[in-house]
Image (spheres, coloured by chain):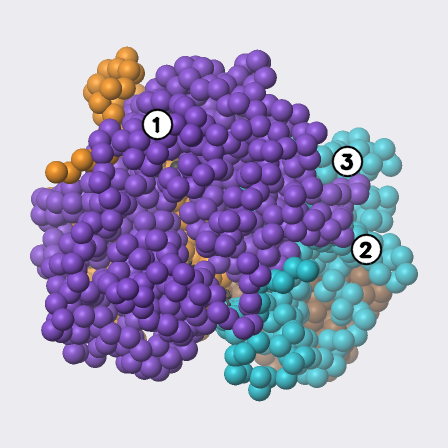
Chain colours: A brown, B orange, C cyan, D purple
Amino acid sequence: STPAPSDSAAPADAPLEVAYISFAVANTYDEPMLAAAQKVADDNNVNLTVFDGNLDPATQASLIQDAVASGQYDGIITQPIYGPSILDVVNQAIGAGITVVNIDQILGSDFTTGKSQVDGLSANVVFVPSELGTKFGEQTVAACASKNLDPCNVAYLHDVKASAIGVALWDGFTAATKGSPVKVVAEGETFYNPAAAQTAVSDILTAHPEVNLIATSDQGLQGAILAIDAAGTPVSNFLLVGYGGSEWGQGKVADGTVFADVLQAPATEGKLGMEAMVDALRNGKNHGDVDPFKDFPNNGVMTKETAGQFTGEWAG
Amino acid sequence: MTNTTQVEPSSGVTSRPNFLRHIPWRSIAIVVPFLAVFIALSIGSPAFLSPLNIGNVLDRQSGMLIVAAASTLVLIAGGLDLSVGATYMFTAVICGTMIVKVGGVGGVALGIIAGVLAGLIVGIINGVISTYLKINPLIATLAMSFIILGATKLVSQFGKTGVGQIRVDVEEFTWLAKTKPLGVSLPIWIAFVVVVILGIVLWRTTFGRYVYATGGNAEAARLAGIRVNLVRISTFALAGLAAGLAGVIDLARTPSVPENDSIATTLTFTVLAGIVVGGTSILGGEGAVWRTVLGILFIAMLYNGFTLLRIDPLFQGIALGVIILLAVGFDAWSKLRSR
Amino acid sequence: MTNTTQVEPSSGVTSRPNFLRHIPWRSIAIVVPFLAVFIALSIGSPAFLSPLNIGNVLDRQSGMLIVAAASTLVLIAGGLDLSVGATYMFTAVICGTMIVKVGGVGGVALGIIAGVLAGLIVGIINGVISTYLKINPLIATLAMSFIILGATKLVSQFGKTGVGQIRVDVEEFTWLAKTKPLGVSLPIWIAFVVVVILGIVLWRTTFGRYVYATGGNAEAARLAGIRVNLVRISTFALAGLAAGLAGVIDLARTPSVPENDSIATTLTFTVLAGIVVGGTSILGGEGAVWRTVLGILFIAMLYNGFTLLRIDPLFQGIALGVIILLAVGFDAWSKLRSR
Amino acid sequence: MPNTASSDAPQLLVELRGVGKTFGGTSVLDDINLVFQPGAVHALVGENGAGKSTLSKIISGVYSADSGTLVVNGEEVDFGSPREALDRGIATIAQDLALVPALTVAENVFLGREPRTGGFLDRRTLRRQFVDLAEGTGFELNPDAKVGSLRTADQQKVEILRALARGASFIIMDEPTAALSGHDMELLHGVVRRLAASGHTVLLISHYLSEVLELSDNITILRDGHHIRTGPAAAETEATLIEGMLGRTLGSVFPENSPAAADAADVLVVTDLMAPGVNGVSLTVRAGEIVGLAGLVGAGRSEIAHAIYGAVRRAGGTVEVDGVDSSSSIPAALHNGIFLIPESRKEQGLVLSRPIRQNVTLSNLLQVATGGWVRPTREKLAARDMLERVTVAGDDRRNVSALSGGNQQKVLFARALQRSRSVLIADEPTRGVDVGSRRAIYDLIVDQAAAGIGVLVISSDVEEILGLAHRILVIRNGRIVAEFAGEDMTEENVLTAAFADPITKETS
Ligand SMILES: Nc1ncnc2c1ncn2[C@@H]1O[C@H](COP(=O)(O)OP(=O)(O)OP(=O)(O)O)[C@@H](O)[C@H]1O
Ligand SMILES: Nc1ncnc2c1ncn2[C@@H]1O[C@H](COP(=O)(O)OP(=O)(O)OP(=O)(O)O)[C@@H](O)[C@H]1O
Ligand SMILES: [Mg+2]
Ligand SMILES: [Mg+2]
């Protein structure tokens, strides 16, 4: 079948073919996103084919090219590993008349905005790393204030320090904590892996017994708690601030272990993205920029008081 | 005079047809699985043979082919370069930084030259460390790749402004990846030229002979008057140069560098896998550039096929592994047969 | 009697004191950089020598040490196993799935057995492919690692419920990582026992001799009546078993499996780097388990030191690479000197 | 007396019935029928490539025959591996040394049948058994030395001891003395005699016809993979053997060799050469002169050659070729006109995985290339010409590894002939080469000298040195200790000079 031009809507009953270019298929964060998209697809007679970017931007670019070349798809959903790497091929896809919806990660080079950076994109449903970093920094400041710490010695664990998201997050964090008692005394990397985080935190605690607060992703926090346990210190000696909004994180915020956790909403993004795709293909309607957090309470930040209003969208 | 020690005329076994006996089974090995998959995909997916698809595949593999062709020489000469992936990222960052900082057409020219040159320098360092300093090439280039990746991050700190990565959306530069003389993209042309040159160098020049001899028996080569260390260093230098060229070309396509160490590792591994699937020995002394080209394209074709045939990603790894085992197993089998 | 082939008494060089001449420079190589770094860190960071820190480092490295010790045997026997990282993840997923699906103490026992057994089976398959099917071990285990990682994803689909990931927060299981007999964690004890056993097997048993002989000169070993293929398969089986054991131990510590292929690759690489830094030859026939232990701990100590000394992550790679080059360069230098 | 060669070892009657073998379509053995009488020494002679090693490998389970059968004690067997042959009591001293460099001498000797207690190596027993075994043969070896650090000759002894250590009834010796010195050769001969006397069967393959005639009871001649004849040794002479092997007669092994002109210029002048293992050597070689370097194994002859060639760093002294100072590097030596044929063709000489043709042209590629570009036709012609001169036939696009040992040696010689030089150094040029080819190589050496080239020949075969050289230098401890020419060139003089070493005094 030839791809349906995006301006002419397909009949409601015809099955649609959509390619889903995932960040990584076997990944706890990405799986619920895919599952949510899959559900919407099933409900709307859309045949979803999943491709595995497997953490490699070049692979994603290839996959998109291949999907376009195959001529089998009406739409493509992208979840970029590194936006700039696939800009070109996304443009090719749009040029070939395929409807493209971008979810979760920035498609483009500006990591400070949720606005679409590609002409002809049907919808853009992303979280903004620098905003995430800002909220993250604000919660860190709040955590320090809750214990009246000045200075407040913080160990900050990047996921991947040199990555685009990592840098954007860090910049947001530093801007938000500027002028506050927050003082980053140690840095480490988690590589999204609790075991790696555990190693990093063990070493940090040995070298910097003065650390009051650990700020990192949910995976990083898991490793941090393991490391603190292994050191034989009560976890309550430390303030923990996280981001990710996972099921695990929600539980830990609810029971007071973690001070606050900034939400990420993979399932919501997957759902909204796929809905936008269906709408575009069936009704020719572009959703444009969609803020996935607009319906969440407390600006998407879990604290002990608000934790009950959230359910984690992924495992953590 | 010359009473020469005879060779068989008498042998009884003539049951195998003559033309079959003259096929070099040894060399043909990777060709058979390659053709088998090629034909299967042509039948299985109508899109496969389309010029667009073939062009896409080749265009994407152009950098990989350049690096792999040069790395083949390193392996044949008895070395091993695990740092090509890191060098590839490093040169892209160098090139990008130059373009961003200097700007204009001058910046583009300078960037390209600096990138390629950086690759060459890294290659020479690799060569010197693993010959004159007598450090095993595997560990030497592994250590070098840590160093290079570190250097990459430092340089990119310098090259980027504000949030994010080095971006080189300069028309004069991305042109490199977008031009299509005779309908074929410039990167493909470059890869073609590089591969052909390296292939011929290895096949027909004295240097090529020295490369084979060095990897086949370094001591014998040395006593035959070959400057073994120099030959090895040259192959490392070529690999570095190739990585530099590939880094620049792929930067023009992207046109920004994702800073992720695992990309470097993946590139190195894919290059190595392609070379070995092609049939070049990691022990040195044997192999050919055209084999590497087939090996790299074989793997690329499989991935392409998986997408076209909509194979579930969960099964792709398994399928890839099994097909590689079959292909290489066929190679091993055909070698036994040729005895 | 036995007037042995005389060793030069006459040579003029007696300026070196006698006791120095009897130090086996060859073996001592990795020891010197190891001690140098150890002492430097002890002075540079007061926290380094604390029992807590040393315990942490050892505990984290226990899985790595087990895998590396067994992989050393593979390398000495002339093989190479690039699939240990994948196997490690695979067995963790198998173990976790069992525990989740069966539950209770029975589930834990079954999970541990299944995990370790799965490792063993993968190892045997690796061995058979790379000996009887005559596929180069590098490519055989690379292909196998694609297959194993694929299988890992399939199994984990089955093991997890709802959103998420296999999580085995079972007291009876995590106990494995948390108990500290005599103040030292159980994983360290297990690693210690495994390393000592493998070290003695290699050093003192006839099987150990056969491993050296197989890697040193396979043809000679075969002519001497050694079942070369069986020896190789056994080493691969040991490596698989070790990866299984390590996967289970590390799962008990985490206690969930991150599904990320690059973790597997990183493990494989770190293991290989440790072995080679320790001084075991990738060409086979030479090496020792204790050298590997030092090599692995050397690298771990460096990373630990980087954090303790607050080295910026951006510089860590560079520092790591340079120190490895220095350490291995020292090794090469001391080998030359011992001539 | 080797302890393991006890006379109660069961006797084995080994027979070959219609055995044939082909490699890649080439027939190497054709319809061989042979019976090896137990308790006898059975010799196998033939040209290089006649199929001797192949035949022995069929018996020892390395290859299996394509046609025909192997019969042991009346029972048809098909050994799938050397292990099975060993289990039946058939052990081999392989032509190509097969040792594990990283293991010690004792460990290599008992590899695969170590004394053990519960899987653990019993080192004390191992050592004791080794000492017993070595004592029985008279070989002197340090049991704890790593084999990789030994000289070729000592490695050969390890290989011999290993076969003896198996307690086998049938022992195949494929050119066991090729790398041995005269003294060790005698020791081995003693071993062979005692083995046969105690009921063992020995299959001896050798190119030393005197050795064959002296030791064996029966002799089989192979030619081109065909069985020519088998008969009692008493019925043969060197001449009849040569005739059988070559299918033609060969007058003398050594060619006519007229001395160089008295006024010939010095082409090689070495002064006070110092290098590892070389302790101040001065020598000259005149144009057209063949100078022999004699000495015991390990005397430092190869080291001298390597130092002259620039293959090792010189610590002092000068080397002049045609009056031009030659610096210490191989390319410089080649440029100045020195060429070295190294002693180990496998380790130092040939690139086994490359075609014959490319091995021939390796050192002189520039002659068949223009601007770095190899000219295939020129290369083909050049290689063919050289190969014809050294009498190696067949497709030269095959890998060198497919050639028999002697023919490999000739390929190495062919490389030296491609460009005429001033000085040719040949280190053990005929190791493992059959009589016919040996004559061909001697002819080549003499031709070279006649063409005005100075030749330096190193050989452990004193007879060869005596037959070939105009002048002999005896080397000991890296020094020249004696020089003989003319009438003084006798075996006794050379050996006396070589042995007269107060430190390692031999008791022979
Ligand atoms: N593995 C092999 N592959 C191909 N050809 C072989 C192989 N082994 C031996 N040949 C060929 O078989 C023939 C007989 O070889 P073989 O080694 O038995 O000779 P030989 O009588 O032992 O000679 P030499 O005296 O030189 O040792 C030779 O022509 C050789 O080229
Ligand atoms: N002290 C030593 N330790 C280790 N290896 C040695 C030693 N001396 C000599 N060798 C090695 O043994 C080999 C043969 O020894 P050498 O060259 O001294 O003997 P040669 O006089 O040439 O006799 P042949 O040619 O019969 O071996 C050489 O290649 C050299 O590398
Ligand atoms: Mg032979
Ligand atoms: Mg010698």
**Residue mark closest to the camera, 3 vs 2:** 2
* Circle number at residue D222: 1
Q: In the rendered view, tell whether residue C37 sits above or below residue D127.
A: below
Using residue B6 as the reference point, say whether residue C209 is left or right of it: right
Question: Where is ligand 3, by quadrant?
Answer: top left
Category of crowding for the residue at label 1, using alpha-carbon neighbours closer than 10 angstroms: few (below 14), some (14–19), many (at least 20): many
Q: In the rendered view, tell whether residue A170 sits above or below residue B242.
A: below
Category of crowding for the residue at label 3, using alpha-carbon neighbours closer than 10 angstroms: few (below 14), some (14–19), many (at least 20): some
Mark 1 lies on a secondary structure that is: strand
Mark 2 lies on a secondary structure that is: helix
Give the x, y percent position of residue D474. Answer: 37, 68
- Quadrant position of residue D289: bottom left
Compare residues B275 and B170 and report the one nearer the observer: B275
Q: Amino acid at mark 1?
A: Leu
- According to the picture, the residue beneath numbered tag 2 turns out to be C189
Q: For the residue with label 1, is its CB less than 8 Å from the closest atom of ligand 1?
A: yes
